[in-house]
Image (tube, rainbow, N blue to C red):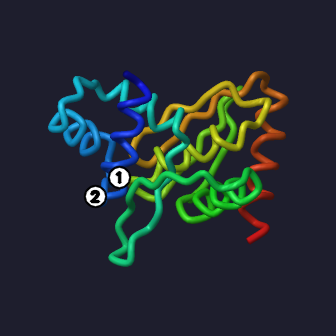
Amino acid sequence: MKKNRHDKIIEIINANEVETQDQLATLLKNAGYDVTQATVSRDIRQMKLTKQVTPEGKQKYVYTTADPEAMHDKYVHVLRAGFVSADVAGNLLVIRTVSGMAMALATAVDALEMPEVVGCIAGDDTIFVAIKTIEEATTVLKNFKAMIDRG
């Protein structure tokens, strides 16, 4: 069932400019899939969907099977496009993003598979990145800023 749903997600995002998880969930429901927002969020992470800027300046989900190095560059590009600021609060890295970009950046952070990162929670313009230790949080912040500054 999950494979069929993932195939349908690829079909949907290739045929539509899907900007949000809610929009994707609605299109899946219209196609006969009984999904929750949590299921769609999990699918997006498992499929490593990213957001791409359209010619109109909007964002849409895209699926790619590019090689890992190309994907790393794409994730760093997403970070650069949406990053506003970041600071450490204990073992949390708090990242501020352009409005509406937090989920895309959280997906990019997860996809970069930094061993210190436990996971991310994204809102509209803020991401909480859980880091294993307080010491590693500072290191992750430095590495994160270095990735963004290399552009």
* Residue drawn at x 56%, y 65% as measured from the top left: 81
The kind of secondary structure element at disc 2 is loop
- Residue 16 — which label? 2
Distance from label 1 to label 2 (Cα)?
5 Å
Q: Residues within 10 Å of mark 2 (few under 14, many from 20)?
A: few
Q: Position of residue 94 (x, y in %)?
A: 60, 40
Q: Residues within 10 Å of mark 1 (few under 14, many from 20)?
A: some
Q: Is residue 135 left or right of residue 6?
A: right
Question: Which amino acid is tagged 2?
Answer: Asn
The kind of secondary structure element at disc 1 is helix
Residue at the left extreme, as displayed: 30
Q: Position of residue 21 (x, y in %)?
A: 33, 41
119 vs 25: above or below:
above
Closer to the camera in the image, 136 or 10: 10
Q: Is residue 45 left or right of residue 33?
A: right
Closer to the camera in the image, 139 or 14: 14
Q: Which residue is mark 1?
A: 13
Q: Is residue 35 left or right of residue 54?
A: left
Q: Position of residue 129 (x, y in %)?
A: 62, 34
* Residue drawn at x 45%, y 55% as measured from the top left: 62
The quarter of the picture where residue 109 lies is top right
7 vs 66: above or below:
above
Question: Which amino acid is tagged 1?
Answer: Ile
Q: Position of residue 134 (x, y in %)?
A: 78, 26
- Is the residue under label 2 in contact with that under label 1 (CB below 8 Å)? yes
62 vs 92: above or below:
below
Q: Is residue 136 left or right of residue 35?
A: right
* Residue drawn at x 35%, y 67% as measured from the top left: 58
Count of all numbered marks drawn on residues in the image? 2
